[in-house]
């Protein structure tokens, strides 16, 4: 019986609380929640409902408003946005959806040539969007040199290629850009463009119409992958300036030696020998022919003989004499009779 009375009492209290509580509707970002509460203000209802409120959120009616039955509370949450400018980051809460308005609310100025990225993609400043991140790349001043023309350009491009695209500078094959097209842009950097000029190369039996961004013929040939080897030369000379439309002839130079060889006859000498029978001969040193060489240097240009040097003769091996021993008749000696001394 006691337990039943306690249960009935609790039910009675609950029913009294139910009928005395304010029926309230809470609308958060379009989502409706029906609640009954004994709170006395709008702020109390939201706190009781576990709704976290930021200072930038819009609450209607305001949090200090007293409650009445069937009150509708609307909560318009401010959207968080992370703004990155160079290496600085800050988080704001906003109700704006136009990029320029968001930046203005945050006190961030957007320069004329600054570049705007929203969630990683470029966007125009007037775009209507609910962003998570806004990144601003500040424009930097660079100098573009093309021949005799020098211009200053403010850009937010990330690479040299992007700068040239913004400046509407078109490149053709073989044009040279320094730094490279993929180099990152730095404030105050200088971008130099060397235009390739058309010219013709006659080399190795071929005619090549090509382009090169070079100041001299030698540089142009190197860019075309044509090397001068040894005594090769060009017409005009490699150090000559490259001019649009010129024809460059590559002269391949080779030299070869024409060699002629021959023999040199040896001499035969006779030598009398007393201990050899008369009229008998004997070879005591065999003769050997010598060798001579005649060399002529022949010069060819593009395979055609253009000159040859004076002959130069050299004895490679001198001849060796042949010596023959010949028997000699002994000499007849007569002894002189001494003359006696006179008295």
Image: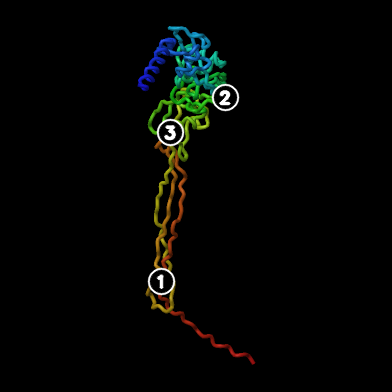
Q: Quadrant location of the N terminus?
A: top left
Q: Is residue 82 visible?
A: yes
Q: Nearer the viewer, residue 9 or 267?
A: 9
Task: Give me the C-alpha separation between circle 2 and circle 3.
Answer: 36 Å
Q: Helix, strand, or loop for circle 3?
A: loop
Q: To which residue does mark 1 refer?
A: 284
Q: Nearer the viewer, residue 162 or 115?
A: 115
Place of residue 315 in the rendered image (x, y in percent of width and height, measured from the top left):
45, 56
Above/below status of 21 relative to 287: above
Q: Helix, strand, or loop for circle 1?
A: strand
Residue 297, picture quadrant: top left
Does 60 sit left or right of 279 as displayed?
right
Q: Are marks 2 and 3 in contact (CB under 8 Å)?
A: no
Q: Nearer the viewer, residue 83 or 112?
A: 83
Query: Mark 2 vs mark 1: which is more N-terminal?
Result: 2
Task: Give me the C-alpha separation between circle 2 and circle 1.
Answer: 97 Å
Residue projecting furthest to the right: 343
Which residue sits at x=40%, y=60%? 289
Q: To which residue does mark 3 refer?
A: 225
User: Mark 1, mark 3: which one is toward the viewer?
Assistant: 3
Which residue sits at x=41%, y=15%? 13
Place of residue 255 in the rendered image (x, y in percent of width and height, measured from the top left):
43, 42
Q: To which residue does mark 2 refer?
A: 187
């Amino acid at each position: 019986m006691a337990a039943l009375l306690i249960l009935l009492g609790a039910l009675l209290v609950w029913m009294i609380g139910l009928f005395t509580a304010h029926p309230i509707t809470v609308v958060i970002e379009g989502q409706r929640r029906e609640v009954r509460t004994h709170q006395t203000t709008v702020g109390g209802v939201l706190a009781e409902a576990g709704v976290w409120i930021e200072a930038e959120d819009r609450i209607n009616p305001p949090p200090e408003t007293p409650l009445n039955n069937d009150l509708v509370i609307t909560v318009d949450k401010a959207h968080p946005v992370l703004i990155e400018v160079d290496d600085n980051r800050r988080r704001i809460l906003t109700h704006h959806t136009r990029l320029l308005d968001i930046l203005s609310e945050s006190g961030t100025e957007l320069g004329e040539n600054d570049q705007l990225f929203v969630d990683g993609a470029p966007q125009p400043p007037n775009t209507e969007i609910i962003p998570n991140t806004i990144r601003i790349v500040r424009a930097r001043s660079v100098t573009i040199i093309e021949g005799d023309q020098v211009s200053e350009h403010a850009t937010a491009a990330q690479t040299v290629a992007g700068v040239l695209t913004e400046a509407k500078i078109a490149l053709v094959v073989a044009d040279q850009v320094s730094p490279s097209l993929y180099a990152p842009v730095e404030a105050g950097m200088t971008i130099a463009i060397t235009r390739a000029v058309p010219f013709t190369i006659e080399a190795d039996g071929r005619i090549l119409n090509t382009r090169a961004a070079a100041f001299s013929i030698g540089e142009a040939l190197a860019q075309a992958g044509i090397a001068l080897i040894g005594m090769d030369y060009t017409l005009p000379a490699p150090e000559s300036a490259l001019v649009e439309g010129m024809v460059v002839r590559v002269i391949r130079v080779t030299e070869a030696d024409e060699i002629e060889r021959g023999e040199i006859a040896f001499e035969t000498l006779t030598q009398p020998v007393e201990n050899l029978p008369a009229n008998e001969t004997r070879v005591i040193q065999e003769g050997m022919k010598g060798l001579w060489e005649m060399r002529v240097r022949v010069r060819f240009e593009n395979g055609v003989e253009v000159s040859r040097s004076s002959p130069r003769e050299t004895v490679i091996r001198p001849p060796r004499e042949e010596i023959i021993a010949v028997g000699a008749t002994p000499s007849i000696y007569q002894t002189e009779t001494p003359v006696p001394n006179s008295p």
